[in-house]
Amino acid sequence: MLDEMTYEDVELEELPLFRGLPAPRRTNLLRHAMVHGVPSGTVLFEQGDVPNFQLIVLAGSAHLFGRSTEGREVLIEAVRAPDLIIPAAVLTGAPYLMQARVPEPSRFLLIHAAAFRAAVEAEPLLAHAAIGSLAAQFRRMVRQIKNLKLRNSIERVGCYLLALSKRQGTPDRAVLPFEKTLIASELGITRESFSRALSSLGKSGIRVDGQMIEILDATRLAAVCAPDPLIDETDGEGFPI
Amino acid sequence: MLDEMTYEDVELEELPLFRGLPAPRRTNLLRHAMVHGVPSGTVLFEQGDVPNFQLIVLAGSAHLFGRSTEGREVLIEAVRAPDLIIPAAVLTGAPYLMQARVPEPSRFLLIHAAAFRAAVEAEPLLAHAAIGSLAAQFRRMVRQIKNLKLRNSIERVGCYLLALSKRQGTPDRAVLPFEKTLIASELGITRESFSRALSSLGKSGIRVDGQMIEILDATRLAAVCAPDPLIDETDGEGFPI
DNA sequence: ATCCAGCATTGATCCAAATCAAGGCATGAC
DNA sequence: GTCATGCCTTGATTTGGATCAATGCTGGAT
């Protein structure tokens, strides 16, 4: 544990979030902070919980799920390192609207909510980082709403693949980042519809092989799903965390 | 115009956003700021535009629309005074993802984007207000996504009415705040479906008369639409703007 | 008054996507 | 090996909501 802490301390210094912070403030903030490594499947918090910590993804990722009263559950967002996990809830002290689960072994920095709020209040650099994270997350939600309201399922799937291949830097293929059932729920459709959408896109220039999707003809694919930078593009890194 | 400015100046002092700001900073911020009264129908900006100003709703409201490439258009959010209009775009300098239009005669404060960014950077009180506005807007988007992904159209309409009546403080009725077509697009359905949903809810304790919806039996209504505070409730005023 | 434009309703029909149901194909336990 | 288990696919069917089309209502404008 001691070893781990020392190791992490080095890494924390490298987070833009803490670079540039006056040393005493940083020390104070991190005094009661903890680094937690958690296994796949861990539930970080439930929807409805009042935030106790600001969680920061140091390595790995977290999945945010929305759950209905009858128990249906859909993926709303995947948060990848490095980012804050729902600062909107922590900074307002309001109950989480989503459940957070960990899909792979991951490491988080935990800062007591009150301490984090105080630090953001007092330290412009931290406030700046929080604003950047909040703004980026807000914009992702807006894009998702436009996606849901303005497109049908085939368009959503097609644009998802194009965006994925672009993000992965491989114009001729995309590798699905998680199970198809989960992606389907992210796109607001059932796993069956997702499967059918993929196979129907076979005649629009893609080839499906497990998690790997070959994009044989990006132009033809784009023609049927009408990609739109104001929905599909991911914001550049304006505010590094 | 001079008269108007003087009048507004008094009002601006009362905005929590500016109360508590050091006088020189406030003066400096407002030096190049303008108050603009605009008629119903005005387009404040288009989606894709790069923000020139931070707009602040002083009186009235603004509607934010998402538009598809083929020209379909849906209401994503209504911003009411007092609030910031999409600080996420202004603070990151990224293009707007939505078009803003004014549904009623309204008044806005315009602050040059660069000046606003600088002021937020330098002034913790402003940063705090921006964070509060961003967080609240983020949470509204999350609620909307859960609403779209986890509910069918009848549930959305029923919960919309319940939330509306609660917000308006009249448990036995709700007055629709704008045209049904617009509300339908906000709920992610067509006007025809909205109309049918309303009439089908007739057997679940409501009576429709134009824009006025009587809620005869809130319990029965709640039984068919399963309201959920984590979707329908509106956040309390944690951070006044 | 009449006309018209904009919004809303209602009915008929169609279609996209959900649901229901049956297998398939891996992977891991034993 | 056999047997589960979890994920995915595919087919058949249903259904929720969209679309198409016609009509109604209301509030100006003239």
Image: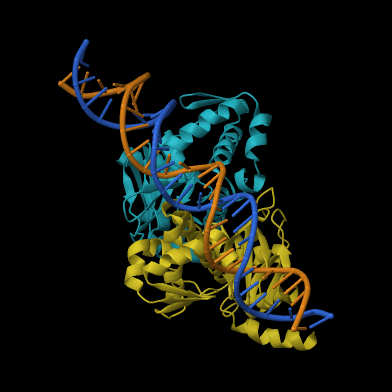
Chain colours: A cyan, B yellow, C orange, D blue
Q: Quick one: quadrant of the N terminus of chain B? A: bottom right
Q: Is residue A90 visible?
A: no
The residue shown at (56%, 38%) is A154
The residue shown at (60%, 26%) is A203
A43 versus A49 height, above or below: above
The x and y percentages for residue A238 are 62, 49
Q: Nearer the viewer, residue A6 or A67?
A: A67
D21 versus B27 height, above or below: above
Q: Nearer the viewer, residue B147 or A239?
A: B147
Residue C15 lies left or right of residue D15; in this view the side is right
The x and y percentages for residue B153 are 46, 57
Residue A150 lies left or right of residue A80; in this view the side is right
The x and y percentages for residue A228 are 66, 44
Quarter of the image holding residue B235? bottom left
The residue shown at (49%, 66%) is A121
The residue shown at (49%, 32%) is A196
The x and y percentages for residue B93 are 67, 55
D6 versus B33 height, above or below: above
Quarter of the image holding residue B57? bottom right
Q: How many marks?
A: 0
